[in-house]
Amino acid sequence: MSYEPLLLSEEQEWFGEWWLPGNPEDKLAGTLKYDGGGNLVLELYYSFGSTSAGPKETRIEIRPEHWPIIYGEVCNHEITLIETFSKGLSEPKPPMRKVMARFAIVGAHINGCDDEIFNVAEFSFEGLRQWTGGATFGMTLGEGGCECAGEVRNDNGVWYNLLRTSLNFIDSSSSVKASESELEVFLRVTSKKLFTLDDVFTEVDMFHDLVALATTSRAGVTWLRLGFPEAEASASKKSAHAYLLYHPVAFGCRNADKINANQILFTCGSLPFEKTLRKWLQIYEENKAAIRIILGVIYDSDKFVEDKILASACAAEVLHGGLKLGGEPFSDKKEFKRMREKILKVVSEERKSWVKERIRNQPSLRERLYGLINRLEENVVKQFALDKDLWVRQTVKARNDFTHQGETPGQTLIELDAIARVTTMVVIFNLLKELGVPTEQQLKVIGQHPEVKKASRLARKYLKKSQPDSDKSAAGAKS
């Protein structure tokens, strides 16, 4: 069986008939073009609601138009365009309307992003095969003879599979196995409760963030296939599958160069797929913001140091809260409220609002940074050879100075870069610890990952005890 996917990175073109839902009699000829970069354009001859009998009878509509859904049919294959927009008709005769679409479902007609119609989503990313390195593919599962390397089920009736299959048809009588280059590794999400398109994106984003973190890469989406329940597909006599063309957060190319092995934090060989995913499902929602902030730093490593400082400090604060590490000054909320009320009683009326906003039962940035670095394995922290107190003070000072003054007196750009890099690594290694990545693997990462090595080198030079502290007065700084 052929399992060749419709790739997001390849140009596509379909000529067929197009119409609006509820008005299948008003069909227009047109060509749907996909540029391999997420842009979908439907070139229609004339416009919906006009007549194509001739130029004199054609109503030329200059005004912009938008349609939630446009249906198409190409050689008996259904296509749905979702969230479409057109600026108006062009001048040439016959007039042409170019319609932009946000999504294209190739293989089915659906009612939109909120239509609960899918029960399966399959997709792949750049670097997925490398991340699955060491995984054991064994049991044959379902259609196409896919080999399964693991399955995880959650409490909501959703199960996840890591799969591998051949992209090319293979004669079952042949004794020759598919070569490694012909195998496609992908993920499958199956749900008892039917998915909407938005639900599919939620699952894809969750896996994307995992693979992107593990490989410290963009982990671009290479393809996305949707499945329908067998009974529904049989009743409507339509295909059981459809492909989605759209503009993901990160584009992937299936034939892209391999990710440098040294930049991979862990694989399914060092942390098995099922164990990784179970833990990821536990921590992801609470820590999604911190994960995405730190992935943003990874994606754009050349951003300004000011951005790095603010982003890494923000990620640290959010992660500390997401991991529920505590540190609140008052464990008893009622006691905190009584204390605050006593203080407010002695404050003038015009100052009460100002004081109330500043008395919070939350740990400071300083306390959060200590909480994060102190929970890491001692052997891991030792490899950075930094003075924890100095790092905390300088990070708090830099964050506060940038936030309130727009500059950081007494701190050079290279020192700020060291602070941002170390803070980023503290966040990343906390995530690795939370996932259960073995200490041995964490130490291996410190010794071979280019960005981690650079952070360690800068920490040794600029965040050691021997480094003079340019601002001793900041020792008690708190956010």
Image (spheres, rainbow, N blue to C red):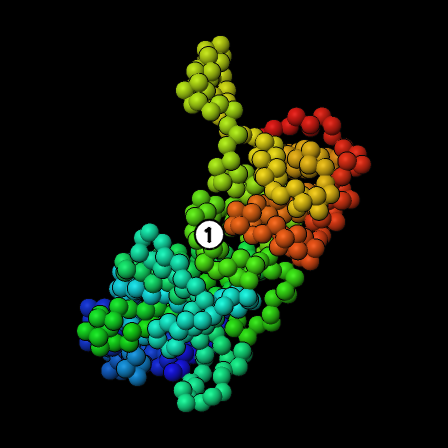
Q: How many marks?
A: 1
Q: From the image, which quarter does the C terminus lie in?
A: top right
Residue 75 screen position, x and y as percent = 30, 84
Q: Amino acid at mark 1?
A: Trp
**Front residue (pair 402, 443):** 443
Is 206 displayed left or right of 457 in the figure?
Answer: left
**Front residue (pair 428, 61):** 428
- The residue at the point 39 percent across, 77 percent down is 145
Q: Secondary structure at mark 1?
A: helix
Q: Residue furthest top?
A: 346
- Identify residue for label 1: 280
Residue 111 screen position, x and y as percent = 26, 64
Q: From the image, which quarter does the N terminus lie in?
A: bottom left
Q: Is residue 23 above or below residue 55?
A: above
Residue 10 screen position, x and y as percent = 48, 76
Residue 391 falls in which quadrant of the image? top right
Inspect this view and state whether residue 222 appears. no
- The residue at the point 36 percent across, 65 percent down is 121
Q: Is residue 173 above or below residue 309?
A: below
Residue 20 falls in which quadrant of the image? bottom left
Mark 1, residues whose alpha carbon is within 10 Å: few (<14), some, or many (≥20)? many
Is 23 displayed left or right of 43 in the figure?
Answer: left
Is 433 displayed left or right of 383 in the figure?
Answer: left
- The residue at the point 31 percent across, 60 percent down is 191
Q: Is residue 16 above or below residue 363?
A: below
- The residue at the point 37 percent across, 80 percent down is 14
Inspect this view and state whether residue 152 appears. yes
**Front residue (pair 75, 170):** 170
Residue 338 screen position, x and y as percent = 43, 15
